[in-house]
Image (cartoon, helix red, strand yellow):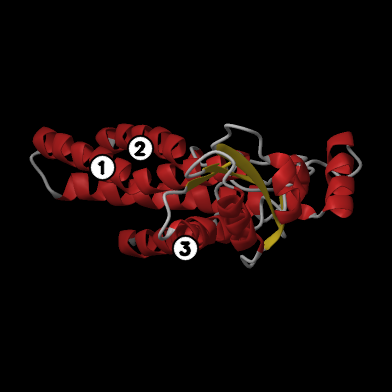
């Protein structure tokens, strides 16, 4: 009897459920998310306590030296890396350079250990700082080139690629669905409702996922022992499934 009242009420409820999505943190879980007391979590905690939280996810900087045995260039970039805010230490350090460089060697690997854990937002900020500030400054005026890698960097890069692809994916899928429904029903209202409800469903689903699996709300009810970041490919997979279901029911309705 009051369709607009129920429409507005349900839309508000779904939008409230989607609010946690704005705090979603994408990434791959590590042993810090294992249950307390498990062997993997115990090993992780002891390593972090003894060597620092960043020891579980160091960056690796590959340096291409201008010429073999170029100790000065290697010392210079090691010094710059150690002076970068957020870096705990490097291996090798400046004192180890004569030992770490061998004859005819033009490529050197530097292990950069952050002050923060791999899952910490500050670690992602450090990676960006190294790539955009420290390394370009160290390369300036030289032929030396350096590249930051490592498991933590790869995870961050993979997450960034998928996150940047999500809006394009949404636009293409929803756009094609809109065109198909427009041709099928000769209406703009029907496909518009389908597109809006698909986006609302995605927001609510990811909001609940963030609240439960990242924040831990109600995790005990599901028997979850730990929480952590959301897998970066999950939003795309969830949308693909939800969009198929919502279009099915839109056609039926």
User: Residue 191's spot in the image, x, y percent?
Assistant: 20, 44
Could you tell me how many numbered marks the image carries? 3
* Left or right of 168 on screen, residue 108: right
Residue at which label 3 appears: 137
Quarter occupied by the C terminus: top left
Seen at 47% across and 44% down, the residue is 66
User: Residue 107's spot in the image, x, y percent?
Assistant: 55, 37
Kind of element beneath mark 3: helix
User: Is residue 240 something one can see in this rendering?
Assistant: yes
Q: CA distance from mark 1 to mark 3?
A: 44 Å
The disc, 2 or 1, on the residue closer to the chain's N-terminal end is: 1
Seen at 31% across and 44% down, the residue is 170
Seen at 38% across and 34% down, the residue is 240
For the residues labelled 2 and 1, say whether their Cβ atoms are less than 8 Å apart: yes
User: Residue 121's spot in the image, x, y percent?
Assistant: 61, 59
Q: CA distance from mark 3 to mark 2?
A: 46 Å
User: Residue 67's spot in the image, x, y percent?
Assistant: 50, 41
- Disc sitting over residue 243 in the figure: 2
Quarter occupied by the N terminus: bottom left
Q: CA distance from mark 2 to mark 1?
A: 8 Å
């Amino acid at each position: 009897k009051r369709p607009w009242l129920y429409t507005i009420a349900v839309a508000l409820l779904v939008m409230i459920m989607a609010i946690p999505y704005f705090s979603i943190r994408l990434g791959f879980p590590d042993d810090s998310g294992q249950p307390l007391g498990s062997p993997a979590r115990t090993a992780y905690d002891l390593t972090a306590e003894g060597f620092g939280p960043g020891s579980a996810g160091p960056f690796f900087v590959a340096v291409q030296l201008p010429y073999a045995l170029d100790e000065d260039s290697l010392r210079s970039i090691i010094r710059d890396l150690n002076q970068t805010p957020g870096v705990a230490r490097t291996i090798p350090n400046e004192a180890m350079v004569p030992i770490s460089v061998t004859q005819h060697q033009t490529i050197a690997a530097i292990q950069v250990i952050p002050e923060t854990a791999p899952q910490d937002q500050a670690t992602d900020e450090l990676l960006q700082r190294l790539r955009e500030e420290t390394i370009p400054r160290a390369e300036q005026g030289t032929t030396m080139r350096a590249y930051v890698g490592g498991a933590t960097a790869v995870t961050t890069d993979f997450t960034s690629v998928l996150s940047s692809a999500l809006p394009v994916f949404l636009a293409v899928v929803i756009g094609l669905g809109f065109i198909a429904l427009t041709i099928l029903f000769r209406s703009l209202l029907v496909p518009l409702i389908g597109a809006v409800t698909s986006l609302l469903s995605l927001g609510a689903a990811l909001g609940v996922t963030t609240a439960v699996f990242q924040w831990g709300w109600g995790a005990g009810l599901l028997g979850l022992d730990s929480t952590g970041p959301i897998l970066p490919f999950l939003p795309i997979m969830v949308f693909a499934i939800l969009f198929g279901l919502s279009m099915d029911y839109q056609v039926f309705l």
